[in-house]
Amino acid sequence: MSDDGEPDHDPESCIVAVTLDEESIGRSGPDIEHERAIAIYDLIEQNFFAPLGSPKGPFTLRLGITGNRLMFDIRREDGTPVIVHLISLTPFRRIVKDYFMICDSYHQAIRTATPDKIEAIDMGRRGVHNEGSQTLKERLRGKVDMDFETSRRLFTLLCVLHWKG
């Protein structure tokens, strides 16, 4: 464990590739595609991700939405299946809705608001994002061990799956 109580980063406990289920995301504009690419890059760049009771990684992750569930299809780097976790999206509905509303307010404020107003909205956005990240981490407790930053990046991807353009 590191000084902040988070697991130490281990090259055998990480995600090295992420794909988003194309059926889940639909068509999007260039701005959304750019956000997806950044979120995936950031996640792969640094993460701690260890499915409990599974062999060591590194892992690949395919995320998708099936019905009212978020699917985590976890595989070893060579494609060998490890496990698929399905978690209910119900606990995320309000958080994702609030997050999108705040993001819209933030983008509108950038055009006309004072720096103080923009900063206040951004602080609210980060707070809702942290709430979603914590909820995701809790929903995967006992299934996948991860640090908070990995949970934040995965929550961003959950939002991307909801953001259908």
Image: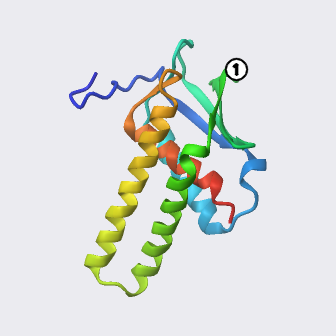
Using the rendered view, name the quadrant where residue 84 is placed.
top right
Using the rendered view, name the quadrant where residue 160 is placed.
bottom right
Q: Nearer the viewer, residue 44 or 161?
A: 161
- Give amino acid for label 1: Pro
Q: Quadrant of the N terminus?
A: top left
Res 111 seen here: yes
Q: Residue at x 26, y 27 (%)?
A: 5
Residue neighbourhood size for the residue with mark 1, other residues' Cα within 10 Å, grouped as few (<14), some (14–19), many (≥20): few
- Residue 21 percent coordinates (x, y): 73, 44
- Residue 159 percent coordinates (x, y): 57, 53
Q: Nearer the viewer, residue 104 or 97?
A: 97
For numbered disc 1, what is the local secondary structure?
strand
Q: Nearer the viewer, residue 61 or 124?
A: 124
Q: Which residue is at the far right?
A: 23
Q: Which residue is at the far left?
A: 3
| Residue 135 as seen in the image, left or right of residue 9 | right
- Residue 126 percent coordinates (x, y): 37, 57
What's the coloring here? rainbow
Vertical placement of 35 versus 139: above or below?
below
Q: Which residue is at the far bottom?
A: 112
Provide the residue designation for mark 1: 81
Q: How many marks?
A: 1
Res 152 seen here: no
- Residue 14 percent coordinates (x, y): 49, 28
Vertical placement of 155 versus 143: above or below?
below
Q: Residue at x 76, y 57 (%)?
A: 26
Q: Quadrant of the C terminus?
A: bottom right
